[in-house]
């Protein structure tokens, strides 16, 4: 599952609302002031990376080829192709995929470029995967305002409140995608 910028709060929110759904989530944990929490978080991140890199290192390196075939306009072709490759790879390995636009960057120029990039990517996903019940897209760009210091401590990385807001916005799309997968698995089992 591909999801950008969410926390363990999403996992617990999904588990509370649908404990029967097995949802595998990769988690980003921001640094916090409490040293014990930082050490524990660093250890958890290290273990997670070790598990994930153990799978990746056995594979040949992936290359972005034929970037223009995505239909995205310049300069977003390589970005779109990388998303296309990630989604295709995940589907080929039996996974469901949720692609999420992370909160838009602060500043008028950066925000407009980020919106253009994400618009191109969303259009490419629609062209390639429209109607595929195992692929979903959610635009979370406006969910958190990264220029708000209560939600982002550096105008990019989210605070606990920012992560909670983003996690709350991810619950419904994750639940919809998970229920589509459970429905498809039920049909395949009959």
Image (cartoon, rainbow, N blue to C red):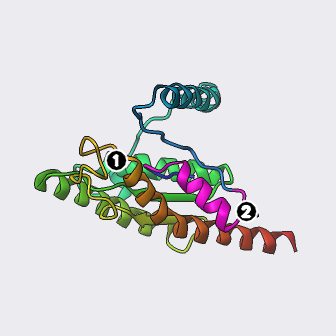
Label 1 sits on residue: 79
Mark 1 in CB contact with mark 2 (< 8 angstroms): no
Q: Which residues are magenta?
A: 5-22
Q: Residues within 10 Å of mark 2 (few under 14, many from 20)?
A: few
Considering only order in the chain, which callout, 2 or 1, is on the residue closer to the N terminus? Answer: 2
Q: Residue at x 67, y 49 (%)?
A: 93
Label 2 sits on residue: 19
- Seen from the viewer's position, the closer of residues 30 and 51 is 30
Q: Is residue 108 visible?
A: yes
Q: Position of residue 87 (x, y in %)?
A: 52, 53
Q: Position of residue 144 (x, y in %)?
A: 32, 59
Compared to residue 70, the image places residue 123 above or below, namely below
Q: Quadrant of residue 101?
A: bottom left
Circle on res. 94: none
In this rendering, position of residue 32 left or right of residue 148: right
Element on which disc 1 rests: helix
Find out whether residue 37 is within the magenta segment.
no
Find out whether residue 19 is within the magenta segment.
yes
Q: Residue at x 53, y 70 (%)?
A: 172
Residue projecting furthest to the right: 190
In this rendering, position of residue 148 left or right of residue 82: left
Q: Position of residue 80 (x, y in %)?
A: 37, 52
């Amino acid at each position: 599952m591909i999801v950008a910028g969410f926390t363990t709060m999403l996992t617990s929110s999904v588990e509370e609302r649908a404990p029967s759904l097995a949802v595998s989530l990769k988690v980003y944990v921001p640094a916090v002031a409490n040293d014990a929490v930082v050490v524990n978080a660093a250890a958890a991140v290290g273990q997670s990376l070790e598990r994930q890199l153990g799978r990746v290192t056995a594979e040949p390196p992936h290359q972005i080829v034929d970037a223009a075939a995505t239909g995205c306009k310049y300069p977003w072709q390589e970005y779109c192709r990388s998303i296309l490759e990630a989604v295709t790879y995940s589907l080929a390995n039996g996974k469901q995929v949720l692609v999420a636009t992370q909160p838009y960057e602060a500043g008028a120029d950066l925000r407009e470029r980020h919106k253009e990039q994400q618009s191109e990517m969303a259009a490419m996903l629609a062209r390639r995967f429209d109607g595929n019940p195992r692929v979903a897209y959610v635009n979370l760009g406006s969910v958190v305002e990264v220029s708000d210091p209560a939600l982002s401590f550096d105008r990019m990385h989210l605070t606990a409140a920012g992560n909670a807001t983003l996690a709350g916005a991810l619950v419904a799309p994750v639940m919809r995608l998970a229920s589509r997968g459970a429905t498809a698995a039920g049909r395949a089992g009959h």
